[in-house]
Structures are given as C-alpha cells and as structure tokens.
Amino acid sequence: MSIKGLDVSRFQGEVDWERVKAAGYQFAMLRAGYGDDSVDGQFRRNASECNRLGLPIGAYWFCYAASPENAAQEADSCIRTVSGYRLDYPVCYDIEQASADYVEKQGVSFTPALAQSLVKSFCDRIEAQGYFAMFYSNRSFYDTYLGAALAGRYAFWYARYTDTFDGTDCGIWQYTSTGSVPGISGNVDLDLAYVDYPSVIRRAGLNHLDGTAPVPPSPAPQYITYVIQPGDTLSGIAQRFSTSVRTLAELNGISDPDKIYAGNTIRVPENGSSGGSAPVYYTIRPGDTLSGIALKYGTTVSALARLNGISDPDKIYAGDRIRIR
C-alpha cells in the first residue's frame, strides 16, 4: 500500500488546493514553522484550505535547536501553531544538515548524542500534548547522527531522491524535490505514505480528532534578539541588558561562554531589557515592507532590524512576528 502525497511551505507560494486534490493527491505535510517561534508564512492559509476541502494534512517544524530545552520550546511553538486545525497525519520534527550548521555557528558542537536528544525532546513534548509524533531526515544525516533506534521509537519520514524505494523502515518516503503538481508553481516535494496514518491516529485517540481541545502550552518567555558585534563578550552583553551570562548561555544553547561570534543572533530575556514598558509586537502581513511598518509605528527600519536580528531589511515574510519596541 502507498498513499500519494506532497509537502509544502511558503516557498511554494499560494497553492490552489482544489487543483491539487483534483489531481489525486491524498495528503499533504505542511510546514508550520521553524526555530523557537517563527510561523511559516503560508501555513495558516494552507491548513485552512486543506481542512475546508477535506484533504488530510500533517505538519512539520524545522529544527534550529541547540539543546533539548530549545527543542521542547520549538515543540511548544509548533503545538500553539497547529492546535486550531484538524491534523489526520503526524506532527513531525524536520532535522537535517542545515540544523547542524546553524547550531555549529552558535558555537555548539553538533554530535549524534545531541541530535538524538533533540528529536527525543521534541517528539516527547508532542506526544505529551496528545499528538502523533514523527521525525524527518535524509539518508546521510540519518546515518551520521540519528540511527535506527529513533526510527524504532518514533515514526520516520525518510528523504532519499531515487526512482526505486530502498526498503528503509519508514512511514513516509519523500522521493523527489522536483515534482510538478497542478495548482503549484515550481518544484514540489513528493511523498508516498506506507502507513494509513488517519486510521492509526483515530484508533489511538490522538491529534484531538474526537473534538477535545488541546491545552496549548504556555507562551515561551518573551525575549528580544541581539546581533553580536565585533569585540562583544557574553559578560558584556549580559551587563548591558541586566541579565546574567548563565541565563544567556542557557537561552541560546551556548556551551562555552567564551566562544561567541560576531554576526550571530542571540536571544536576550525580555525582563532584562524592556525598561519597564510593555513590548509591542506585529505580525507581518502580505505586502508589508519593513519601511512601511516602521512608518506606521513611528520608528526606523534600522531600529526594527536591530531589535529583531534582521540582516536584510528587504527580506521579511508574512506570518512572522516581529517586535516593534
């Protein structure tokens, strides 16, 4: 048995889901977001349209965690994002080489032990909230960092781009990144599911398909972002924002406080930098520009970029939340 599916993110733009369904696709895995609390700019539209049309969906969250604690925070962000939608397929953690590269840039050594602990932390948190957990990776990353033990514990979504399936024990196989699908412009990832997840999930009473509402995790503590400047030290940043080196290290997964790198972005606790005033946030809408948002709120592009760690003011994305002040 194989079930025909696909997976998308904001990079596919606005999808015509009626045409996708009419073309015979039976499920979709939607990127819900990435990192600590960044929602994919097309997720809400994609999920709403698929729910409206009765096209079964699951969701995935891209890993940028540097510690198990970070991974649990990412799981909480994912749950808050998906909890308002019907999910007949798993909630998946996407961990691959880009995840490792990001963590290494934070000065943290990315090891198999760390990778496995990230998957366990995320998936356990997903399960604790009553959802069916899964993880995603490709052959090379799986062999280097993850291994069969994880696939024996959690469902596995396997990426390997070949014409013939190689028999790897997995629930979903992503077999190409250059598929063509009616209703979608450009290349699309295509998948085959070998498990009837809607039936499995219903029988297990998961994903709140019985109508019970999940209890969304409490919002993560608020923080601002700061781009490390040449000559900065973690102790100097801590002093500037009225916090501690230990707090900054734990919040950012920094194992060696003496190793921070200019150009990297770190998070600073809100209570150490708000100056007693309530923070103001804004969710970016389609068509917004950073200059337009700055004008609306009486601030500057450079101030918004600095406050949110935005390196290119021309690259902002609908659905993302930024801090105004």
Image (tube, grey):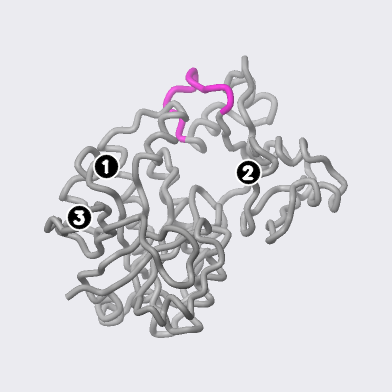
- Residue 262 part of the magenta segment: yes
Which residue is at a point 51% across and 38% down the rendered structure image?
Answer: 251
Report the residue marked by disc 1. Answer: 141
Report the residue marked by disc 3. Answer: 151
Disc 2 from disc 1: Cα separation: 31 Å
Q: Are marks 2 and 1 in contact (CB under 8 Å)?
A: no
Q: Nearer the viewer, mark 3 or mark 1?
A: 1
- Residue 133 part of the magenta segment: no
Disc 2 from disc 3: Cα separation: 34 Å
Residue type, numbered disc 1: Phe
Q: Classify the position of the C terminus by image quarter.
A: top right
- Left or right: 191, with 291 as reference point: left
Q: Are marks 3 and 1 in contact (CB under 8 Å)?
A: no
State the image coordinates of residue 320 (x, y, percent, origin top left).
62, 54
State the image coordinates of residue 250 (x, y, percent, origin top left).
48, 35
State the image coordinates of residue 324 (x, y, percent, origin top left).
76, 47
Give above or below for 65 relative to 283.
above
In terms of depth relative to the viewer, which is nearer, 258 or 111?
Answer: 111
Give above or below for 168 relative to 240.
below
Report the residue marked by disc 2. Answer: 223
Locate residue 147: give its quadrant: top left
Give above or below for 127 relative to 110.
below
Provide the residue span drawn in magenta.
Answer: 253-263
Which residue is at a point 20% across and 55% down the rendered structure image?
Answer: 151
Residue type, numbered disc 2: Tyr
**Residue 5's disc number:** none
Q: Classify the position of the N terminus by image quarter.
A: bottom left
